[in-house]
Image (tube, rainbow, N blue to C red):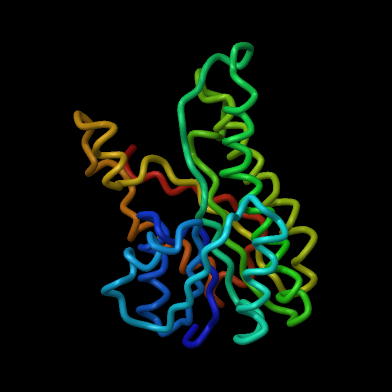
């Protein structure tokens, strides 16, 4: 995997930083994508390696395409796309939910993925090789009360993963997803101070699974949505 070009969305977040660390430690060139340039550069101020920062609104199709096209013109097509960008929030009952809440979950979890794929996958298709790894969710394997919008958006990620895998496997591109349970992040520890984070999934553990799916060892895997749930 040395010198592979890896695009990581949501790179300023806890999981994005762990995934970047995984690939940088293996000599990859990483393209770190997030909305806020200052947050990106602050997150990686003390990180060594071949890094390219891309600040763009991933919910904007044209902005995402233009920002990444400039990178690919210089570095060539991406070998790996890790769609880490996303988010979670509790909601109201489905019949009482504000449309803006639904749109927010769809934007964060679905449209960021779609726009990144629109920008990255054509180059992979032309090259005849590539790996796309998405982030689904173990909690979205079935509906949950007060989580309708989130579950629907993450279920869409799983179904899009399966559809893309069938569309792209003949082009040498593997598309798979991981479905984690609760991640051990500072935000989750603050939100659930009475929980036992030893039962959660560390960002390093999830990064290792993502790294496997990005490797040649996973070349026969297409359309998998792999549960990564620790003890939770």
Location of residue 170 (image quadrant): bottom right
Residue at the location (65% across, 77% down)?
70
Tag count: 0
Q: Residue at x 61, y 28 (%)?
A: 100
Q: Nearer the viewer, residue 224 or 132?
A: 132
- The residue at the point 30 percent across, 47 percent down is 185
| Residue at left offset 33%, top offset 64% | 43
Q: Pinpoint residue 176: horizontal percent, then vertical percent.
A: 61, 58
Residue 186: percent from the left, percent from the top? 26, 46
Against 101, residue 2 (above or below) is below
Q: Nearer the viewer, residue 206 or 221?
A: 206
Residue 174 in the image, given as x and y percentages of width and height: 66, 67
99 to the left or right of 188: right
Q: Is residue 162 left or right of residue 17?
A: right
Relative to 100, say whether 75 is above or below: below
The C terminus - image quarter: top left
- Horizontal side of residue 65 vs 143, given as left or right: right
The image position of residue 46, as x and y in percent, is: 26, 74
On screen, residue 30 versus residue 154, left or right, reads left
């Amino acid at each position: 995997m040395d010198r592979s070009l890896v695009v990581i969305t949501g790179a300023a977040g806890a999981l994005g930083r762990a995934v970047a660390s995984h690939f940088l430690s293996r000599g990859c060139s990483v393209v770190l994508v997030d909305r806020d340039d200052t947050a990106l550069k602050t997150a990686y101020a003390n990180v060594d390696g071949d890094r390219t920062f891309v600040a763009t609104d991933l919910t904007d199709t044209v902005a995402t395409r233009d920002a990444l096209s400039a990178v690919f013109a210089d570095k060539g097509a991406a070998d790996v796309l890790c769609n880490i960008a996303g988010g979670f929030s509790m909601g109201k009952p489905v019949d009482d939910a504000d449309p803006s809440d639904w749109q927010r979950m769809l934007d964060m979890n679905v449209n960021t993925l779609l726009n990144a794929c629109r920008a990255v996958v054509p180059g992979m298709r032309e090259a005849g090789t590539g790996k796309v790894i998405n982030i689904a969710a173990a909690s979205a394997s079935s509906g949950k009360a007060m989580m309708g919008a989130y579950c629907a958006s993450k279920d869409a990620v799983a179904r899009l993963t399966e559809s893309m895998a069938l569309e792209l496997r003949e082009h040498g591109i593997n598309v798979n997803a991981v479905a984690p349970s609760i991640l051990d992040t500072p935000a989750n520890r603050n939100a659930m101070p009475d929980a036992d984070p030893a039962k959660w999934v560390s960002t390093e553990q999830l990064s290792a699974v993502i790294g496997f799916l990005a490797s040649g060892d996973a070349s026969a895997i297409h359309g998998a949505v792999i549960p990564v749930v620790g003890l939770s």
